Amino acid sequence: MRDFFARHGVWILCATAVVAVTLSVLSYFSATSSVFHDAVGVVSAPFRAAGEAVSGWFEDKRRYYESYNDLMEENQALREEVAALRADARQAEKDRAENARLRELLDLRAQRRDLVFEAAKVLEHSTGNWASTLTLNCGTKHGVAEKNVVVSSEGYLVGIVTEVGTNWCTVRTIVDTETELGAVLFRTGDVVVAEGELALMGENRLRAVYLPDDATLLIGDYVLTSGLGGYYPSDLVIGTVERVEADDNGYAQYAVLRPMVSFDDLTEVFVIKEFDIVE
Amino acid sequence: MLTRQEMWIKWTLYTLAVLLLTLAFALTLRGARPLGVCFYLPPLFVGVVASLEGARAGAIFALCYGAVCDLALPGTLPCVHTLAFVLAAMACAVVAQSLFQPGAICSAVCTLIVFAVFDAFNMLALAIADRAPFVTMLSITLRETAVSLPLLVAVHPVLIRLHRRFVF
């Protein structure tokens, strides 16, 4: 054994150092993804898609037989929710018309939300416990770029593109520990920061920090992107308040947020490639 | 002593076995989160191969496999798999050649070493970035190891059978 380390150990460690430094440097300096990352991503994309399709099929079958009663209950709850939402929509229609008239009187620019979407399928869900990611089947050739925002088909925030290859991209979900987003509490208008936390990531939750001292949170309050700074579109739903807890020191409070999407169940998402919002 | 051709055949078979096992686990265990964590396979392959093949071959396998993992999987550092797997493979080889005879127990001990080194790197990366408290990271490490280690029941027999085909 001593002989081995004398003869080969140093060389293997040198090779390891070279590979590690190369990977780190390429990752740091590359605007999208490094050549090697891209090549591995392109080659593995069909296999990831096939694996996801097969395991998704098994999952669908399992759920089909398992959750009939749950679906019946959910159906009833959704019917009631639809009735309430229809009433809200009627009121919102009146409010919208009134808002347009008032803006015209005040000579303000008309509100608009121009978002350019790219539809994408989820090739792979997170495979580790230290990061929460999704791999999508669109990349630079579809116009996707780093820091693009990804939303679900309902328009709920899913995450941010962190790495892009030719026909794939990696999305860090909003529960990942690297996530830090400007957010706003919809009901009160308080500005907060939504961030991922390792302990909450396992539960698919994130938290809202820097709550104002006089913040009055209610369970179920919506938290939206603030859009401050113009990096991300505003008014995308991040999640709802699930509970409020004190931090380790006991001096400050934070709210645990429940995302509107179930990341494990996502199969199709939309990347917002460009946006122009006037509020 | 294996000929060059036999060496190529052996490592091609190892590669195929790792790919097939990865695919099989991905198909069957996707989305399963016992104890709140998902199964993590790569350390199992590194631990078993290093315990069977010794320091030099084990470390070279760990280097190649770690680099592929870094290119294909997200991580706390761009080179976390490469660094952790090579160091762990060397430690495994020492254990396999001086403390245990290669076998199921040896593979289990080596896999524990790989998980310990790999998660130590992850914890260090997150601690430096101040992104998680130590207790939380330790809890994830312990749960991830406890959940993934039993998968050796499937991984070890396949790889040891391959290894024995090429031992004279």
Image (cartoon, coloured by chain):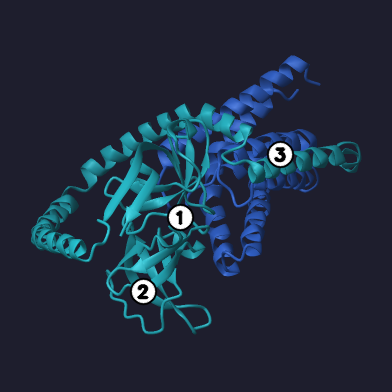
Chain colours: A cyan, B blue
Kind of residue indicated by mark 1: Tyr
Q: Which mark is residue A231?
A: 1
Which numbered disc flags the more N-terminal residue, 1 or 2? 2
Q: Quadrant of the N terminus of chain B?
A: top right
Look at the numbered disc 2 and give the secondary structure of its residue.
Answer: loop
Verify CB contact (< 8 Å) between mark 1 and mark 2. no
Q: Position of residue A160 (x, y in %)?
A: 45, 50
Q: Residue at 54% across / 54% down in the picture?
A: A130
Q: Which residue is mark 3?
A: B50
Q: Is residue A126 left or right of residue A259?
A: right
Q: Which residue is mark 2?
A: A190
Q: Residue at 49% across / 64% down in the picture?
A: A197
Q: Position of residue A64 (x, y in %)?
A: 22, 41
Look at the numbered disc 1 and give the secondary structure of its residue.
Answer: loop
Q: Quadrant of the C terminus of chain B?
A: top right
Kind of residue indicated by mark 3: Ala
Q: Is residue A73 left or right of residue B35?
A: left
Q: Residue at 67% across / 55% down in the picture?
A: B121
Q: Choose between A108 and A271: the one closer to the eye.
A: A108
Kind of residue indicated by mark 2: Asp
**Marks 3/1: CA–CA distance:** 47 Å
**Marks 2/3: CA–CA distance:** 55 Å
